[in-house]
Amino acid sequence: MAIDRLQRMLVEFAAEREWERFHTPKNLVMALIGEVGELSELFQWLTAEESAMITHDAVGRSRVEEEIADVFLYLLRLADVLGIDLQAAAEAKILTNGKRYPPDKARGRAVKYSDLDNG
Amino acid sequence: MAIDRLQRMLVEFAAEREWERFHTPKNLVMALIGEVGELSELFQWLTAEESAMITHDAVGRSRVEEEIADVFLYLLRLADVLGIDLQAAAEAKILTNGKRYPPDKARGRAVKYSDLDNG
Amino acid sequence: MAIDRLQRMLVEFAAEREWERFHTPKNLVMALIGEVGELSELFQWLTAEESAMITHDAVGRSRVEEEIADVFLYLLRLADVLGIDLQAAAEAKILTNGKRYPPDKARGRAVKYSDLDNG
Amino acid sequence: MAIDRLQRMLVEFAAEREWERFHTPKNLVMALIGEVGELSELFQWLTAEESAMITHDAVGRSRVEEEIADVFLYLLRLADVLGIDLQAAAEAKILTNGKRYPPDKARGRAVKYSDLDNG
């Protein structure tokens, strides 16, 4: 499966470089943040419209792909080190969100579920 | 495939709530950051050793699973909205990293590739 | 001076709660990230125009003030623990930025200094 | 006063480069995140002990000073654009935190105030 396969590649990658001791969950969360920060830098000065077109030129596409991939790789590694099944956790969270945000209450409104009844 | 399946669930989730107009790439990057911040909060005061045991009790495991899932869901949605193939981008980035961090130079050293020759 | 005064308040705050051992630079950076994540959550679904009006109602103002304060407090504490003079570092950085972004080259352009000559 | 003075320098800096239109609160929050990400990268692979010594060599000190300054500058600019008094907000938040974390309950414990009664 796609996720497992990538995680096995990352296990091997770390082992070949003897990086396992750096890959504590705490450190991996910080590394994830670093990559999310780089992703944010690509979007920070763009308007909403410009952000939707960032992949329309080759340089923009390549930069965004690389940063999104970096975030994904650290997330895969973090989940693996913690023994968390990323696919199952994601599906469970979609179910939870479905209950927190009933379509009839949440329709067209971007408010946190704890504020949904206030409107 | 696992990633496609989750992305289709998220498309449907957003459509049922008429949330598409909120899901610009720029907004999704900010939402991703919010979730990464919540993940960071779970780890901020833990030692490296404690961070490796966070999933050993049920409450800790459940909290971490939920935050990791949130990060993953926004990453999946962002990639989908941008038309980026997450799996392909991740595999391409592993190859790039393999060249940037040759095992013999990078072994046991956690330095950025641009600093690898300084040591 | 304002910054020193706040930092002394934070030293006392931590001492009264015996929190010094939690306040390693690494942990404080993670705590800072958590607060920046909460700040991001307040802005994530807003348009640029809405973001400029977030302080126009009392609830919005209060939430933003609180999150900005949280970020500032951890930044003050981090600088203090590291022995960094925040005021001096900020003034030095403005000078550096002034050289990196000469007005005639940077005017009206939001690009990174390393890309300034490309356009 | 120190904070005002820095904010006036940043107003002038933005004006000279005609960057005001980029400095919406939303964009400045994203720029802040980018800088926090760069700060995180400096600490991500360090142990707690190493993180406390990062300023002991000149290169480490200079890098950390620069990233902390970047975070501070965007925070100053953000507060200014939003019309928030950073000093007052920080003092108010210390008072709030003092009530949320009574010394006798919070002593030696790094738990969120909402969890303080669970221990």
Image (cartoon, coloured by chain):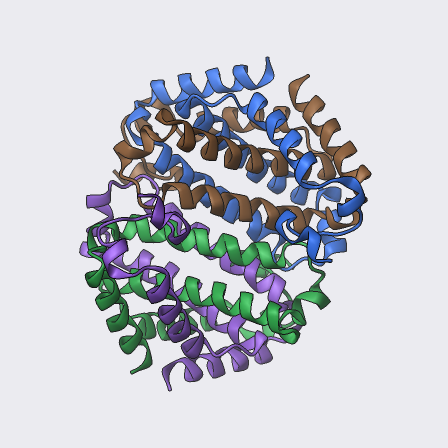
Chain colours: A blue, B brown, C green, D purple
Front residue of B46 and D58: B46
> Where residue C2 sits in the image (x, y, percent)?
33, 80
Q: Is residue D3 above or below residue B23?
A: below
Q: Is residue C70 visible?
A: yes
Q: Residue at x 62, y 62 (%)?
A: D26
Front residue of C109 and D69: D69
The extreme top residue here reads A1
Q: Quadrant of the N terminus of chain D?
A: bottom left
Q: Is residue A95 above or below residue C81?
A: above
Q: Is A73 left or right of C16, judged from the image as shown?
A: right
Quarter-of-image position of residue A28: top left
The extreme front residue here reads D117
> Where residue B60 sits in the image (x, y, percent)?
40, 33
Q: Quadrant of the C terminus of chain D?
A: top left
> Where residue C50 sits in the image (x, y, percent)?
71, 66
Quarter-of-image position of residue D69: bottom left
Q: Is residue B99 visible?
A: no
Q: Is A105 left or right of B94, judged from the image as shown?
A: right
Q: Residue at x 51, y 34 (%)?
A: B68
Q: Is residue A83 above or below residue B66?
A: above
> Where residue C6 sits in the image (x, y, percent)?
31, 74
Q: Is B116 left or right of D82, judged from the image as shown?
A: left
Total labels drawn: 0
Front residue of C109 and A81: A81
Q: Residue at x 65, y 19 (%)?
A: B2
